[in-house]
Image (tube, rainbow, N blue to C red):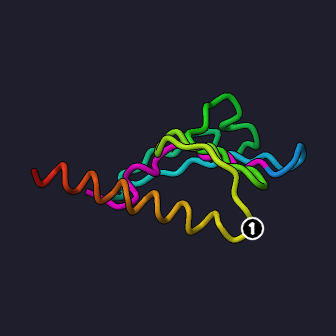
Amino acid sequence: MAFLEQEESIHRWKFSLDEDYRYIVEVSNGNNVIPANIRQKDAFKNTNASRTVGATKIKDTIYGFEREYEKGQLVPLLSKMMEKHYRKRLLEELM
């Protein structure tokens, strides 16, 4: 089980009307299939993001939370959620 396994999805970073980016996060062992239109600006425009990060707010359907955050809190917040869910999945797999 990979630590980043649940991160595989579309992530959206939206900081203003002009700054709205979508990224595909893929976790694999090297056997990736790259979408043909990946270099086009609107490649993921019509896809639902599992994580949307704004300037002061994050909504995450992977870990099931939505909250506001202050500068410097995003990385510790995501790290904590990733660690918590990884440990939970690991314990479930071992039992």
User: 10 Å neighbourhood of mark 1: few (<14), some, or many (≥20)?
Assistant: few
The front one of 23 and 87 is: 87
Tell me where residue 43 appears, x and y as whole percent.
68, 38
Residue located 65% across and 67% down the image? 73
Q: Amino acid at mark 1?
A: Lys
The front one of 42 and 61 is: 61
Residue 55 appears in which quarter of the rendering? bottom right
Tell me where residue 16 appears, x and y as whole percent.
87, 48
The front one of 56 and 33 is: 56
Tell me where residue 3 appears, x and y as whole percent.
35, 61
Is disc 1 placed on a helix, strand or loop?
Answer: loop
Tell me where residue 34 appears, x and y as whole percent.
51, 46
Q: Is residue 45 left or right of residue 2?
A: right
Q: Is residue 22 left or right of residue 75?
A: right
Residue located 63% across and 63% down the image? 74
Residue located 81% across and 52% down the image? 15
Residue located 73% across and 63% down the image? 70
Q: Which residues are magenta?
A: 1-14
